[in-house]
Image: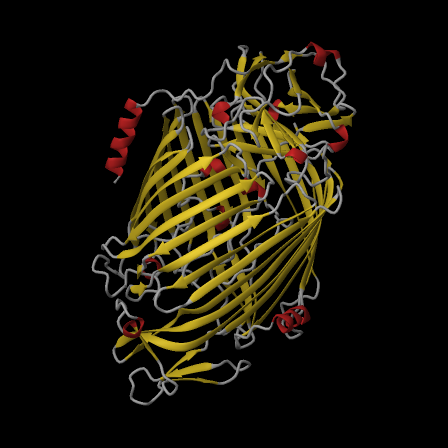
Amino acid sequence: MPTLSSALLLAALAAAPDTAAAKDTAHVVTALRVEQAPALDGRLDEAAWAEAQPAPWGFVQNRPNPGAPASERTDVRVLYDAGAVYVGVRMYDARPDSVSGRLARRDQDVYSDWFSVALDSYRDRRTAFVFGVNPRGVKRDLRIVNDGDEDAGWDAVWDVATRVDAQGWTAEFRIPLSQLRYRPGADEQVWGINFDRRIARRGERSLWAPLPPDQAGVVSRYGTLRGIRGLRAARALEVQPYTVARVTRAPGSADDPYHQPAEWFGSVGGDVKYGITSDLTLTATFNPDFGQVEADPSQVNLSAFETWLDEKRPFFTEGADIFDTGWPPLFYSRRIGRAPQGSAPGDAAWSDQPDATTILGAVKLTGKTRGWSLGLLNAVAGRETARFMGPDGREESAVVEPLTNYTVARVVRDFNRGGSAIGAAFTSTQRRLEPGDGLDFLRSSAYAGSLDWRHRFGGGNYELVGGAQGSWIVGSDSAIALVQRDAGHYFQRPDADHLEYDPTRSSLGGYAGRLGVMKNGGGSWRWEAWGHLYSPGYEINDAGFGFGGDELRGYASVGYQQARPGRVFQRWYAEVAQSAEWTFGGERMGVATHARASFTLNSQWGGNLFYTRSLGGLSPSELWGGPALLTPGGHSMSFGVNTDRRKALSGDAGAWVEVEDGTGARAVEFWGGATLRASERMQLSLQPGLGLNRGGTQFVETVAQGGRDHYLLARLDQTTASLTARLDYSFTPTLSLQLYASPFISAGRYADFMRVADPRAARFGDRFHVFGAGEAVVEGNAEEGRMVRIDLDGDGARETAVGDPSFNVKEFRSNAVLRWEYRPGAALFVVWSQGRSHYAPDGRMDAIGDAADLFRSPGTNVLLIKASYWLGL
């Protein structure tokens, strides 16, 4: 596979023309140097603004009428001095009383008019720094990477002033050079630049350098900024110290020696940024605290695989694109600071275990220089112990997480004017495992590496991408045996002749590869084709995220896009696709045909449809290490609709339904949302959800009896209800209050217990033996724990007992965050959070009663105050 990929890449590079997507002479604006910085007041009344040349060419709509002139005139001028770039913009509006400007917290994308300036100071035609503002002075900043992807986690220290008047509104930006990356020197700087204006009431977006929706690329289509000369290297040192104080009140038993009704905590830490050059930045964090980060959503995971959780911590979200190697990611930053993987002994009477691993420190070097993109991250997570009271009443401690070092390195070389690149990445996880720690189930070392490439051709509208990855893990024989038996590998499968389980191994290696070709622009037609492979020993979950190996996968799609308004539709898209998956042993895991469509009406209402016909196949993971089980095909369909988001009250709703062939098992999910802009300061959103799973089979347990393994399943009836509510209130552009609350209830009842008779039989009745009334009996009660007693061999004696896995899980998570950016780069947070949970093993769903039980349960309350300060040295 890698050999074929390399050959295709070299052939494409040899045959394809240069992808000169950006036309340097089409849109050019010249910056004027000033000796005295303009006053940042939004008035644009200094002589320098009148002297500067306005950006030529008028703005062009991207929507709703692509290619048409903007409905309102926009005048933009650029100044600079030794320390900053200034952008002054006058946005004319024939109806200035209709200019929409809502107060919101920073970076919140709310219904409003907006103006933003994007600077490709690297001039790599793939990366840009974007600074935006609305008429009320609310700021947004982000980075654009990979010529179109947005990195919203990036925050810069800059300033802007706005003013609404009888002609429309104005904005005056000051963007410090220290927040940009460029190559210093006496010669003229040539940067990419674009300006973006959005008029909310018309649903209009217009740009200075046009971005046609039927063409690929964003940064590569920017205009040119000229005239900047004599810039020195901005080797700025930024220090952001912080202090935090926290008090936690949690429920607990008076007999628990580790329980404190009120637990106080305080610490100090900080972040440091140093511009080694104008291209490279060193960022370090010491003793970081992420107490203001919103909690993860509640969920019930009944599969054998891990749940992906989004990264929300600022240190890791900023610049995360540089470490992106495609799917599966070699670096999953949630591994750093994870919950400890060990625990106190099961017979401990009481224990005090940390919820998360302490990050002692982390440092990363990122940037671009002369066509090279570089990223290097190193983090150290501390050794964690849990105190516990043993059965004899003596206090002891157990190591629950070892001292661990994480290293991630990434390098990318751009060429062909940013249209092509070759990249490499490497990750390393090193754990200090001490004899007697009881953590020999963890790998002592783990390594992964990758080589990836991309090449655009055909005017930038076609792209060839590919990659190869390798993994290597080292540890005790018990640790490596655990990996072999774990989800995504299952080397112990009794029917897999291509797999070999070896419990004496002390290391394991694997590889993966991908190759894809696609048409992303140039007319209305779109298509893509992909191939992926993951060897059985592929394992990257020490520093990355993956679902294991033993898989070959193919995917192809073709679609048609109409981006120009018609009589009914403003734009629409339709697509059909085919996918298929096999194991390395040639077992077909699934074949499916997909169709989807999405549309936006001229009224700004929109919708989407999705349909899949699956033919089913063999699932190697369904029996958690048992033989591959035939899973039936079925039909699934989803649809959604959204209202006009320009209205004060808007919303969306949708549903998904899946029906299994032969058995009639079905799953249905409903979701919705409503957003109310109650005033220019306040916004309320509600997102309810309801899921119903009826009659699907769910793995229960493997029981060894009579010299062989028996795989037990049951039909599961599960109901899940959730609600996410948010209230945002902004006092000023820099002072905001956000309230978040999310109750969650999920109940599942198991019935019709069965064992696998013939895992590959086509008929359900041949595949399973469903136990009759006398063969499986539920005994006990929910309070004491119900057991299911089963007669496995049909001799009339119910000699096997398994726990009834029925469940009722209830959680409530909420917080209130008051955020005040009292000066650029410095903030004060006051956070209150509350969490409640309740569990019952009965499987009953009673929404009113469950809610009452949940809110009667004692809650954990946390009050946190965090203050940070920014110093630019």
The quarter of the picture where residue 716 lies is bottom left
Q: In this view, does 58 lie to the left or right of 421?
A: right
Q: Is residue 153 depicted above or below 550 in this figure?
A: above
Q: Is residue 665 left or right of residue 824?
A: left
**Which image quarter is the C terminus in?**
top right
Would you say residue 589 is visible in this rendering? yes
In the picture as drawn, the residue positioned furthest to the left comes out as 497
* Residue that appears at 66% across and 24% down: 72
Q: Is residue 844 left or right of residue 527?
A: right
Q: Position of residue 733 (x, y in %)?
A: 73, 37
* Residue that appears at 64% across and 14% down: 54
* Residue that appears at 27% across and 64% down: 493
* Residue that appears at 41% across and 50% down: 542
Of 564 and 619, which appears nearest the observer?
A: 564
Q: Where is residue 575 in the image (x, y as percent from the top left)?
A: 41, 43
Q: Is residue 872 depicted above or below 75 in this figure?
A: below
**Which image quarter is the N terminus in?**
top left
Q: Where is residue 144 in the image (x, y as percent from the top left)?
A: 52, 32
Would you say residue 295 is visible in this rendering? no
Q: Position of residue 781 (x, y in %)?
A: 52, 83
